[in-house]
Image: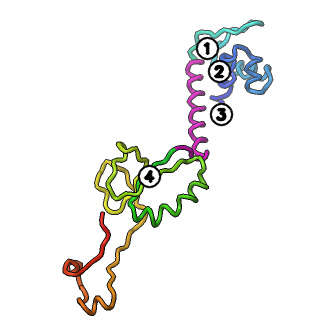
């Protein structure tokens, strides 16, 4: 990629104030740095640096080029740091609100394994059927059952929930078998509540 050739060397010479310091920083020889900068100047058909045996000074073109290239290299470094940080272990405080029964049955049993896998996470799991305000109450995540009520929230389906209607043979013999959901209102039912 000839467009990049010499740019890092040039920027480092300016930042370090000398060819030898730039060479040390980049772990190459000073003659290699000098050659890269000279080739860059030749390719651009412009003098970027005025050199003496004791100092270097940017030309007007060199100053403009340095400003742009320095920002470009900083942006590349920043982009690389962001991407590599994604591969690092998660760290921080995670607050989760979860529907009580679902949390007790499915989430709480997995907490220990999660914390062993991610030891730098501090986890707060709050079990409640109350609708929480993620922002005002400082939650990172809420796990709820049913339909999403607010369209301003982002949601992801975790699983489907199957509901059953069960009765003992003794109950059916005594009160009869309901055939539709509407008939359940006439029966003695135990059901979960919000």
Left or right placement of residue 26 versus residue 143 in this view: right
Whole-number angstrom distance, CA of label 3 to CA of label 2: 17 Å
Do tag 4 and tag 2 residues touch (Cβ < 8 Å)?
A: no
The answer to which of marks 3 and 1 sits earlier in the sequence is 3
Helix, strand, or loop for circle 1?
Answer: helix
Quick one: label 4 or label 2, which is nearer the N terminus? Answer: 2
What numbered label is drawn on residue 11?
Answer: 2
- Which residue is tagged 1? 62
Identity of the residue drawn at 27% across and 78% down: 189
* C-alpha span from label 4 to label 2: 47 Å
| Cβ atoms at labels 4 and 3 below 8 Å apart | no
Q: Earlier in the sequence, mark 4 or mark 1?
A: 1
Q: Is mark 3 in CB contact (under 8 Å) with mark 1?
A: no
Magenta range: 66-92
Q: Residues within 10 Å of mark 1 (few under 14, many from 20)?
A: many
| Residue nearest the observer in this picture, 150 or 191 | 191
Marker disc for residue 96: 4
**Residue 140 image offset from top left, x and y in percent:** 43, 47
């Amino acid at each position: 990629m000839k467009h990049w050739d010499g740019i890092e060397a040039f920027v480092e010479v300016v930042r370090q104030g000398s060819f030898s310091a730039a060479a040390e920083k980049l772990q190459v020889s000073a003659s290699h740095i000098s050659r890269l900068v000279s080739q860059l100047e030749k390719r651009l058909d412009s003098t970027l640096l005025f050199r003496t045996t004791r100092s270097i000074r940017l030309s007007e073109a060199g100053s403009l080029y340095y400003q742009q290239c320095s920002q470009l290299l900083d942006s590349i470094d920043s982009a690389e740091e962001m991407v590599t940080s994604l591969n690092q272990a998660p760290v921080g405080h995670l607050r989760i609100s979860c529907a009580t029964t679902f949390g007790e049955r499915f989430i709480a049993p997995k907490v220990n394994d999660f914390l062993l896998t991610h030891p730098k996470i501090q986890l707060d799991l709050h079990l409640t059927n109350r609708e929480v305000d993620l922002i005002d109450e400082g939650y990172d995540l809420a796990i709820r059952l049913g339909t999403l009520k607010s369209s301003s929230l982002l949601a992801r389906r975790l699983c489907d929930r199957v509901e059953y209607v069960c009765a003992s043979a003794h109950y059916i013999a005594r009160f009869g078998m309901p055939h539709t959901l509407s008939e359940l209102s006439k029966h003695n039912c135990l059901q979960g509540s919000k």
